[in-house]
Image (cartoon, grey):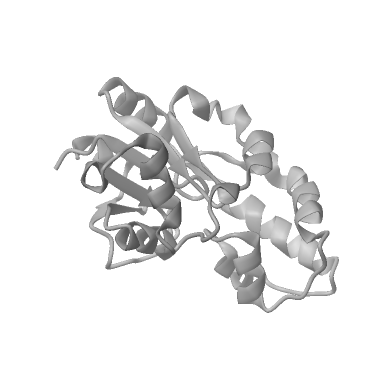
Amino acid sequence: MQYKHIIFDLDGTLIDTEEAILKTWQNTLEEYGYQYTLDEIKVVLGVTTQIGLERLNAKVDDNYAYRWQENYEKYAIEAKFFDGTKEMLKALKEKGCILGIVSSRSYKEYEKYFNMFHLDDYFTYKVLEEDTVKHKPEAEPLLKYMEIAKAMKDECIYIGDMPSDIQCANNAFMASGLVTWNKSGVICDEAKYIFNNPTDLLQL
């Protein structure tokens, strides 16, 4: 099967930000009197801040998002492309694929922390937190992508690293792909494809 629109999650899929994100959550929650291990905090990966807080049963004030972003600056420099993902994006674009981003990141975070990766050189469309009311694993982010890209679901595939990414794609009746090149150990039997290496996607 060939897909015209290749849509990616960002964190943990293209960009290795897991350590930076977990340390930021741990640091920020400590300011509110909470003590979590990095393993306990992993439940926040791949979801919005609000959903993450609910999963941790953490009560915070309206300044949490601001304080989180301030703390993330300490660790953002640790983020980097996973090996081979940058080259994969270039090759897909050269093949004529239309590339998109669907992420739970806010526009402020995208501009502040992802500009250094020059993603706009590769991606035509992006859907971020503010673009939808409902978020992954609900279908709305991918439905929004199809709306702005004027794309049909059968010509799209959404690729991520978390079960919430796969569920989002499945809820939108779109092909799904789970990446394992991040060595996270996440398994999701609902994924249509498994990509162990960025070059696997080029074969598709």
Q: Quadrant of the C terminus?
A: top left
| Camera sees residue 141 | yes
Q: Is residue 164 depicted above or below 124 in this figure?
A: below
The foreground one among 193 and 35 is 193
Q: Identify the residue at horizontal 75%, vertical 56% (top origin).
A: 65
Choose top left, top right, bottom left or bottom right for residue 35: bottom right
Q: Identify the residue at horizontal 76%, vertical 43% (top origin).
A: 73
The foreground one among 184 and 64 is 64
Q: Identify the residue at horizontal 45%, vertical 59% (top origin).
A: 184
Q: Is residue 68 depicted above or below 15 in this figure?
A: below
Residue 39 in the image, given as x and y percentages of width and height:
60, 70
User: Residue farthest to the left?
Assistant: 1
Q: Identify the residue at horizontal 67%, vertical 70% (top origin).
A: 53
Choose top left, top right, bottom left or bottom right for residue 156: top left
Residue 129 in the image, given as x and y percentages of width and height:
58, 50
Q: Is residue 193 depicted above or below 199 in this figure?
A: below
The foreground one among 80 and 163 is 163
Residue 102 is left or right of residue 47, and the answer is left
